[in-house]
Image (spheres, rainbow, N blue to C red):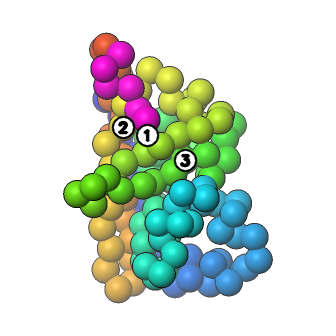
């Protein structure tokens, strides 16, 4: 088992969201559709989860793009990872659990990577 965590100032993400092309470089189309209208704290929590994912892998953000790591929500609102491209390839053999939280100033994420013992637990 591996754990990654990240804490980010929401104000940094809010400023970055004003930069042309930032959303598309960092977030997948599915995430942008999900997060639009939710405010900077939700974007920040997703950003923190992407960083926490890279730390749980042990690679940092190398060999894949942040927009290949989608942090989505299931029907009950619980976050989960949907991986594509090189991020999906880098994550082979692991399943992931995500937890997000935020205050007015900070967003935090924890990602737990667990080695897959059987094919039933493969990350989406």
Q: Is residue 55 visible?
A: no
Q: What is the residue that sits farthest to the left in this orientation? A: 76
Q: CA distance from mark 2 to mark 3?
A: 12 Å
Q: Are marks 1 and 2 in contact (CB under 8 Å)?
A: yes
Residue 90 visible in the shown view: yes
Q: Secondary structure at mark 3?
A: strand
Contact? badges 2 and 3 (CB < 8 Å): no
Residue corresponding to mark 1: 56
From this viewpoint, which residue is outermost toward the top? Answer: 118
How many residues crowd mark 2 within 10 Å: few (<14), some (14–19), many (20+)? Answer: many
Q: Is residue 112 left or right of residue 62?
A: left
In the figure, residue 3 lies in which quadrant? top left
| Numbered range of the magenta stretch | 119-124
Residue that carries the numbered disc 2 in the rendered image:
96
On the image, the x and y values in percent for residue 88 come to 56, 32
Residue at the spot of label 3: 69
Q: Is residue 120 magenta?
A: yes
Q: CA distance from mark 1 to mark 3?
A: 13 Å
The residue shown at (31%, 25%) is 121
Residue 27, label in figure = none
Q: Tell me the quarter of the image containing the C terminus.
A: top left
Residue 90, percent across and down? 57, 29
Of pointers 1 and 3, the one earlier in the residue sequence = 1
């Amino acid at each position: 088992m591996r754990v990654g965590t990240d804490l980010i100032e929401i104000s940094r993400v809010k400023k970055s969201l004003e930069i042309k092309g930032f959303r598309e470089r960092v977030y997948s189309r599915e995430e942008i559709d999900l997060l639009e209208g939710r405010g900077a704290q939700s974007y920040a929590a997703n950003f923190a989860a992407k960083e926490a994912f890279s730390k749980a892998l042990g690679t940092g953000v190398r060999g894949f793009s942040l927009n290949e790591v989608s942090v989505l929500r299931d029907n009950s609102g619980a976050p989960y990872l949907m991986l594509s491209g090189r991020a999906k390839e880098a994550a082979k053999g692991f399943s992931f659990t995500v937890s997000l939280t935020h205050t007015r100033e900070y967003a935090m994420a924890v990602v737990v990577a667990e080695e897959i013992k059987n094919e039933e637990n493969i990350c989406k």
